[in-house]
Image: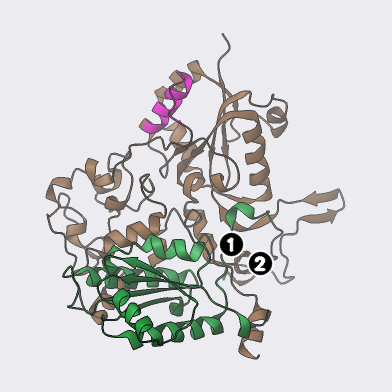
Amino acid sequence: MSENHFQPKIVAFFCTWCTYTAADLTGISRLAYAPNVRVIRLMCSGRLDPQFVLAAFRHGADGVLIGGCHPGDCHYQEGNYKTRRRIELLRAVLRDLGVEDQRLRLEWISASQGEKVQRVCNEMTEELRKLGPLRLERPQHQATEPAGEAR
Amino acid sequence: MTKPKIAFYWCASCGGCEEAVVDLGEDLLTIVELVEVAFWPVALDFKREDVEALDDGELAAAFINGAVRTSEQEEMARLLRRKSAAVVAFGSCAMLGGVPGLANLYESRDILDLVYHEAPSVQNDAGTLPAQECRVAEGELTLPAFGASVRTLGQVIDVDYYLPGCPPPTGLIASAVTALVEGKLPGKGAVLAPDVALCSECPRAATKPDKLLVRAFRRPHQVLIDPELCLLAQGLICLGPATRAGCAAACPGGNMPCTGCMGPTSSVVDYGAKALSAIASLLDADGEDEIAARVAEIADPVGTFYRYSLPDSLLHRRVRPKARELEEEVAP
């Protein structure tokens, strides 16, 4: 399969109050966007445990998109600030593990920004298409290989 | 009555776990009264043939420390699995991958290149690399294969129990052996340590502020550490809140922050992710630049949060595109 036909899988975690509502608006406005994004609704972006991001990657996601309310607009006052801190630190860890920055994207999208959902989903799909799939080793299925022939 | 037989073995480890067994001191004599040590390469002169000669399941338990990287380690783990009624992953390396597991940040070929070609103290003009087979005047010599990544024991064989720690605290070792002898072991898969966070047994717990906020991260050599105050309140990255108890908070008690060797509690899948989440939540910073500046203060984020658990992590190891594929990507 050539890189051009690669269809990246993106798992998106959207907060119910802003970004998920915005994604509804995208649909109501008939704004089409890349079908590569699978949306999971959270009550707040602050609910996002960094383990969710890694689990998505482990189970085949090529990218993870997180959408929350703009800073200052969080329904729960400061959930989005907590996410911002966690994601920044998670990104530092992922970078050292060789996972490109573009594979983890945090966006603030308010309920009225339907067109931003469309733009972000399309942009991210294109970027990941260029990057190619994220390949992770499956430790249970690895035979001990001769040195120098690591996949 | 015949005494139950047990075995100790080491894979990719430093020997500290073996030391921990010896640290049992006089308790070791009590244990030897109760069990027969059938195999312990570090301390006793038994060979692999002695293990092979045993019946399947004849060993009551095998305590295996160290992570698994080479074909020899994998073979020994499989052999001991077959001969043992119960296998105990002994210590952080066997349970989570341990410090040797940080090698999963690199490709195996890059590790060999560094060690045999690039290290400043290496003189290897012929460019020799270890070969699995090599013919010399005396005949054929063989070496174990060097695997693509470091794995936990549980990723290679079925493991019955886990004894965490780097090395496991002697108290936990003694109670594990006692439970084994008395047939009072818990259900399969259990971690033989308390299932609460380290803060619960930390002598500094009382000084932990109700609302912990960290304005700047400090490393132990940069500050004069207050011997009584909660280490997080001093800006040190102490992983106690994300780490399993059972060590009596030996490091915080010794004026050093917890680095997480006991691994996660049972409610956590990926230790590093949970640990970084706990630390990030304490940051007293809201703006993007401010947060980035605090994160930049953390030297070696993977080594900080996954010091003992990278092979056990959800990512395990990124498979990097081979050089050829990269070229194709650049020039389509």
Residue at the (71%, 64%) spot, across then down: B129
Determine which quarter of the picture holds residue B331. Answer: bottom right
Magenta stretch: includes residue A66: no
Amino acid under disc 2: Arg
Helix, strand or loop for disc 2:
loop
Q: Is residue B127 above or below residue B20?
A: below
Residue at the (63%, 34%) spot, across then down: B80
Q: Colour of chain A?
A: green
Q: Most prominent secondary structure in the magenta stretch?
A: helix
Task: List the residue tagged with mark 1.
Answer: A137
Q: Is residue B103 above or below residue B74?
A: below
Task: List the residue tagged with mark 2.
Answer: A151
Q: Which chain is brown?
A: B
The N terminus of chain B - image quarter: top right
**Residue B61 visible, this orientation:** yes
**Region in magenta:** B172-187
